[in-house]
Amino acid sequence: MNIKCLIFDCDGLMFNTEYYSRQNWLRIGKKYNLEMDEWMFEQITGAGPTHFQWVMDQRPLVKEHLAEIRANRNPTIAKAIEELGNINKKGLVELLTYLKESAQYKVCIASSSPQEYVKWLIGTIGYDYPFDVIMGGNMVKNAKPDPEIFLKAAELAGIQPEHCLVLEDSKLGHQAAKSAGMHRMFIKDLVEPDDEFKALIEFKKNDLSEVIDFLKKYE
């Protein structure tokens, strides 16, 4: 295996945003006595607008309060960053430091979230890293599980799909990476993989720091 490019998901992979986002959902759900189950959270994790709206159609009572949920999401995340200094996932800075010093890989971000939001989060890392490509969901027509965003990131980085390793925490992300013909690594956040998800997983690590030894094996 000849890895030349790493493609990071953003929410739940680089940053602990999914946790604070979920707390926001649950807080508003409790306020209105709404059902918010694991199925819903699994389905919306990493989802683009079309799939997200389909999930909300299955939860019409939740959908009624979607405007309030959305309005409070980023302020909830921003408050956590203000209080904690950052919400980096374990091993993020360690991995980025290794990639910067090795200078052997193209490094991209491909997120379902808007590019502006992704760039805002990058600015909170506390470590300056020159990402080669930063893709937001607003920059492609088709969202994950469609492979478009990963293929576009690889194209902009000048790397063939078979030489890319996608780091993802969501089922939709793994489906997209597989369809793109890329290697994929699962790093768990909040979603517990079901049998269908487990079948998609090619490699698995506990946190981002463990990706370093994985890369060293193939250098």
Image: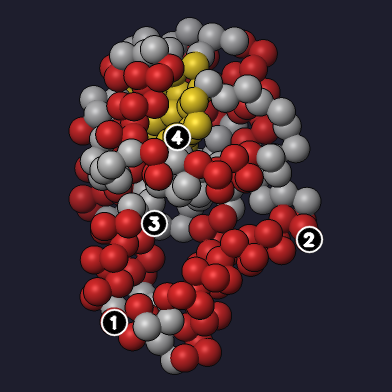
Q: Nearer the viewer, mark 3 or mark 1?
A: 1
The residue identified by callout 4 is 135
Name which residue type carries label 2: Glu
The reply to whether callout 3 and callout 1 are in contact (CB within 8 Å) is no
Cα separation between marks 2 and 3: 25 Å
The disc, 4 or 2, on the residue closer to the chain's N-terminal end is: 2
Label 2: few (<14), some or many (≥20) within 10 Å? few
The residue lying at 39 percent from left, 26 percent from top is 153
Which residue in the structure is indicated by mark 2? 83
Q: Is residue 135 above or below residue 164?
A: below
Query: Residue 93's mark?
Result: none
Marks 4 & 2, CB-CB < 8 Å contact: no
Q: How far apart are marks 2 and 1 (CA)?
A: 34 Å
Mark 4 surroundings within 10 Å by alpha-carbon count, few (fewer than 14), some (14 through 19), many (20 or more) = many
Horizontal side of residue 114 vs 208, given as left or right: left
The answer to whether residue 168 is visible is no
User: Residue 24 location in percent, x, y?
Assistant: 55, 72
Task: Judge by depth and name the residue closer to the eye, 18 or 79.
Answer: 79
Q: Is mark 4 on a helix, strand or loop?
A: strand
Q: Residues within 10 Å of mark 3 (few under 14, many from 20)?
A: many
